[in-house]
Amino acid sequence: MALNGIDISNYQRGLDLAQVPCDFVICKATEGINIVHNTCDPWIQSAKKLGKKWGFYHFFNGADPIAQADYFVANCKNYFKEGMPALDYEMYGRVGTDKAKKFLDRVYELTGVRCAVYTSRSVLTEEDWSQIAPHHALWVAQYANTERTGYQSNPWLPSGGFGAWDTVTLHQYTSNGRLSGYDNPLDLDIAYLTKEGWDKISNPSGSTVPDVQQPEVPDEDIEGTALELAARVMAGEFGNDEERKKNLGNRYDEVQDIVNYVLTAPAARVADAVERGQLGNGDLRKKVLGSRYAEIQGIVNQRAGVGTARVYTVKSGDTLSEIGAKLGIDWHTIASKNGIGAPYTIYPGQKLSY
């Protein structure tokens, strides 16, 4: 028996779980070493009252992985052994599975609970997960298209491997889900679990009393979110290289990781982050993106149908080489512009900028 659910963050602020149908909800709790989402606890308390299964996740970034694990546990200590914890590994948090393992091992050391791991399917073969997969459930993101949809009992998940994992435990199959009781897009998920299976991941020991160690979390020297500090870096503050590292102190890794992502990631991937609200809005987004603002915002506008779009929608049976030949463009250029790497997987309904 599978469970249907949603994962939400402060971008869904105002959502009433009593009005939205779901067997489970997974809420963003923390990010890096200085962000706690104040939407998380009200939703979790609501889920408890409604008898829904629930989870909570940490968005990984470039800060020290042990410090991130300590921060996650310190701010979620009362959730462990009740809800399912998860690590969100994507975008500017892709700093190596060796660091992800340090985070995961530290959480386990402090709580006795193993986090599920959330990432996109392509990342499973682009990085080495062999030391992580045997001990952690996989929560994979793979979408058939970007069309609106409600819950699906058998969402599209093509055959093939999942890297070091043998099976998928949770599948996020759309970011454009629509459910009654909420008017905006939602991430929809299916968990191939019974309620008892969910509880087993959340509390493998079956202990009824949480036994979570309280780590010490150091005070931050520099105020502001990582995005705000990244915007200041893009504007020329904090200096360069060693000077910047000294000025940012223990905030350096998380801030520099955002800067590196914005400056070096393929435009389509940065646009994905913008669309998910993860690089800010308005003036903050403009400052974070710096000299790439026009390029990235142009892609976002094209996808939204604003301006003169040059977008190809993938049809069933299409390959990148065939699309390139049809458009008169080297297919490698299309792949690079849209952040597609080996094995160059595309799917029906996907929109490719060219």
Image: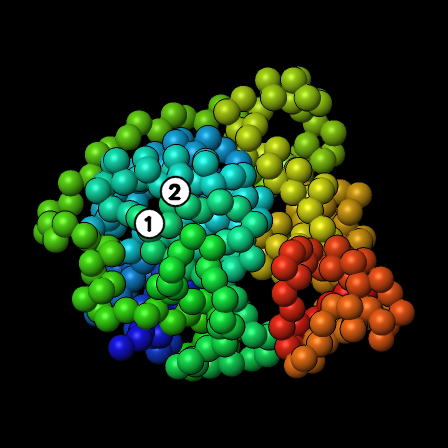
Mark 2 surroundings within 10 Å by alpha-carbon count, few (fewer than 14), some (14 through 19), many (20 or more): few
Residue 287 in sight from this viewpoint: no
Horizontal side of 60 relative to 261 (left or right) equals left
The quarter holding residue 4 reads: bottom left
The residue that appears at 37% across and 50% down in the rendered structure is 133
**In this figure, which residue is indicated by the disc labeled 1?**
134
**Labelled pair 1, 2 in contact (Cβ < 8 Å):** yes
Mark 1 surroundings within 10 Å by alpha-carbon count, few (fewer than 14), some (14 through 19), many (20 or more): few
Q: Which mark is residue 131?
A: 2
The residue most toward the right is 328
Q: Nearer the viewer, residue 258 or 87?
A: 87
Three-letter amino acid code of the residue under disc 2: Gln
| Picture quarter with the C terminus | bottom right
Rendering coords of residue 281 (x, y %)? 64, 53
Q: How is the image coloured?
A: rainbow
Q: Nearer the viewer, residue 162 or 22?
A: 162
The residue most toward the left is 208
Element type where label 2 sits in the image: loop
| Picture quarter with the N terminus | bottom left
Three-letter amino acid code of the residue under disc 1: Pro
Rendering coords of residue 241 (x, y %)? 68, 21
Element type where label 1 sits in the image: helix
The residue that appears at 40% across and 56% down in the rendered structure is 165
Horizontal side of 135 relative to 51 (left or right) equals right
From the viewer's perspective, is residue 27 above or below residue 257?
below
